[in-house]
Amino acid sequence: MTLIFNSDKYRELLIKYQPKLIRTEEENERALTTVKELMNRPNRSLEENELYDLLITLIEKFEREFYSPGKASTPHSMVAFLMEQQNIKPEDLVGTIGDEEVVAEVIQGKRVITQEQAKTVGKMFKVDPSLFIRQDEID
């Protein structure tokens, strides 16, 4: 017996779940919940498999861009990401890496993070300080 993809059934699934590009952790969590639901469903239909594959692709794209340091991330985006993850406010960095102006400029990417600041921030976040230094800045 050959299974046939049912476009109407797939359309209903798309309407129900409304998959889209994932831009926030909350959206990612919702997509992960749906994937878990589909993953544990016995005898998934072709249409459910298609939705499952689509959601996996969207989740992987989000997580690759949001969680993995890479070409898209910068030292400043890493600071911002870690601050968000650990619920650290800019004022928490005042005195640690400089005054309010220095902290604001570092977070906004208007000031290069020095090696000394990178060491300090690395200790604070318990990560390798090299995350905060662009490779072209290392002498």
Image: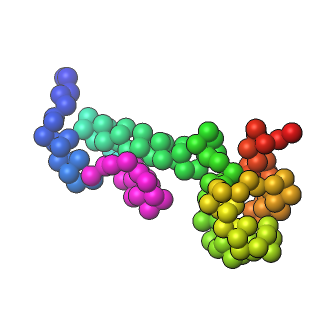
Q: Quadrant of residue 80?
A: bottom right
| Quadrant location, the N terminus | top left
Residue placed most toward the observer, 112 or 27? 112
User: Percent position (x, y) of residue 20?
Assistant: 33, 49
Q: Residue at x 84, y 53 (%)?
A: 115
User: Percent position (x, y) of residue 25?
Assistant: 48, 59
Query: In the image, 137: left or right of 55?
Result: right
Residue 29 visible in the shown view:
no
Residue placed most toward the observer, 8 or 23? 23
| Quadrant location, the C terminus | top right
Part of the protein shown in magenta: 18-35
Q: Residue at x 13, y 40 (%)?
A: 8
Residue placed most toward the observer, 1 or 18? 18
Q: Residue at x 70, y 70 (%)?
A: 101
Query: In the image, 126: left or right of 110?
Result: right
Q: Where is 10 relative to 76, above or below?
A: above
Tell how many labels.
0
